[in-house]
Image (spheres, rainbow, N blue to C red):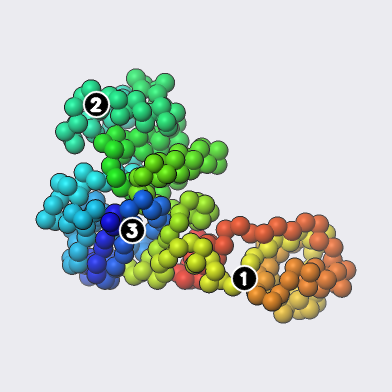
């Protein structure tokens, strides 16, 4: 079964702006799916329609086989949403925020308490359960948003920029939690500007730009389309203008005076690049593979910096 099925989805605002132009997309049950795109690409509009916060202009959307208009309640009960912005009362206790959310779905209080305890413990917030939300750090508030979205135990979790503003250590802790949740059977759709995050977590991604899907497929297959690898070289001294001319055959970009980024296409080797630099009297202090190749693909497809 498809967790999410979208067919020819359109959204046109009264101003004339066409946010979605016939988007078709499917997410398999149990998948960890990335929805990527620059600001204004249509990601938030698409999520708003799927979750019932925005009306569509045309097309069809179903969640686990339930049409979002004909079977609204069943579709919505299958979804947990973590929006970008904090949208809970900061003066409410942490535990009450979860219990209130569970109440919207008709979950009995005893059962809701068990669910709340389960997810607050998993997300490291149990000790804060009786504190007002305003006392939590930014990272804790992000985790509270995730716990609230999960309290009714939805089959589909949608996360809109869940780690924005979260430090690296906390972000990686959230990655581990999301991997565990997905392994237990929850389908996850993630939007993120940290493309490393999508490359690390998602098995399949769709890239949306100007209201249209410009690429869709398994991450490993999409990366295979690049036919190149990118490396960072730390040099012992800067390259002068004449030296730059002599290495033009390679795809080289300057990061700073003593650091360059090099794209090596199929058939080109690191040895060739190192030897070319050596002939110019430039020693390479260190070099490393640029792991986030999904970012390279994203930039090529959207023609925008991230």
Residue 86: tell me if it is visible: yes
Circle 3/circle 1 CB separation < 8 Å: no
Circle 3/circle 2 CB separation < 8 Å: no
Question: In x, y percent, where is residue 248?
Answer: 72, 78
Identify whether 278 is placed above or below 140. below
* Image position of 170 (left or right of 187): right
* Image position of 20 (left or right of 207): left
Tell me if mark 2 has few (under 14), some (14-19) or many (20+) residues whose alpha carbon lies within 10 angstroms of its own: few
Residue located 57% across and 62% down the image = 293
Residue located 68% across and 68% down the image = 262
* Image position of 9 (left or right of 244): left
User: Please, what secondary structure does the residue beneath circle 2 have?
Assistant: helix
Q: CA distance from mark 3 to mark 1?
A: 28 Å
- Which circle, 3 or 1, is nearer the viewer? 3
Question: In x, y percent, where is residue 145?
Answer: 35, 37
The residue wearing badge 1 is 228
Furthest residue in direction left, as rendered? 70
The residue wearing badge 2 is 111
User: Please, what secondary structure does the residue beneath circle 3 have?
Assistant: strand
Identify whether 66 is placed above or below 245. above
Residue located 41% across and 52% down the image = 32
The residue wearing badge 3 is 27
For marks 1 and 2, the one nearer the N-term is 2
């Amino acid at each position: 079964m498809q967790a999410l099925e979208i067919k020819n989805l359109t959204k046109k605002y009264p101003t004339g702006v066409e946010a979605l132009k016939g988007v078709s997309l499917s997410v398999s049950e149990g998948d960890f799916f990335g929805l990527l795109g620059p600001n204004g690409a249509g990601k938030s509009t698409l999520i708003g329609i799927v979750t019932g916060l925005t009306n569509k202009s045309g097309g069809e959307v179903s969640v686990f086989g339930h049409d979002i208009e004909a079977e609204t309640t069943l579709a919505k009960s299958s979804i947990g949403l973590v929006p970008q912005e904090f949208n809970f009362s900061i003066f409410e206790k942490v535990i009450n925020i979860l219990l209130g959310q569970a109440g919207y779905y008709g979950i009995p209080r005893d059962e809701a308490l068990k669910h709340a305890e389960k997810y607050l413990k998993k997300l490291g917030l149990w000790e804060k359960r009786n504190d007002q939300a305003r006392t939590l750090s930014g990272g804790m508030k992000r985790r509270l948003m995730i716990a609230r979205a999960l309290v009714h135990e939805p089959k589909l979790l949608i996360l809109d920029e869940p780690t924005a503003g979260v430090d690296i250590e906390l972000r990686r802790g959230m990655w581990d939690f999301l991997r565990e949740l997905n392994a237990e059977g929850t389908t996850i759709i993630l939007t993120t500007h940290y493309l490393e995050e999508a490359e690390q977590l998602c098995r399949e991604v769709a890239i949306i730009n100007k209201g249209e899907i410009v690429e869709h497929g398994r991450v490993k297959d999409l990366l295979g389309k690049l036919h190149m690898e990118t490396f960072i070289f730390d040099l012992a001294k800067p390259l002068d203008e004449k030296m730059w001319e002599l290495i033009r055959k390679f795809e080289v970009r300057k990061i700073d005076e003593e650091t360059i980024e090099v794209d090596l296409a199929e058939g080109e080797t690191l040895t060739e690049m190192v030897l070319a630099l050596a002939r110019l009297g430039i020693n390479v202090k260190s070099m490393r593979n640029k792991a986030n190749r999904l970012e390279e693909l994203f930039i090529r497809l959207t023609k925008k910096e991230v």
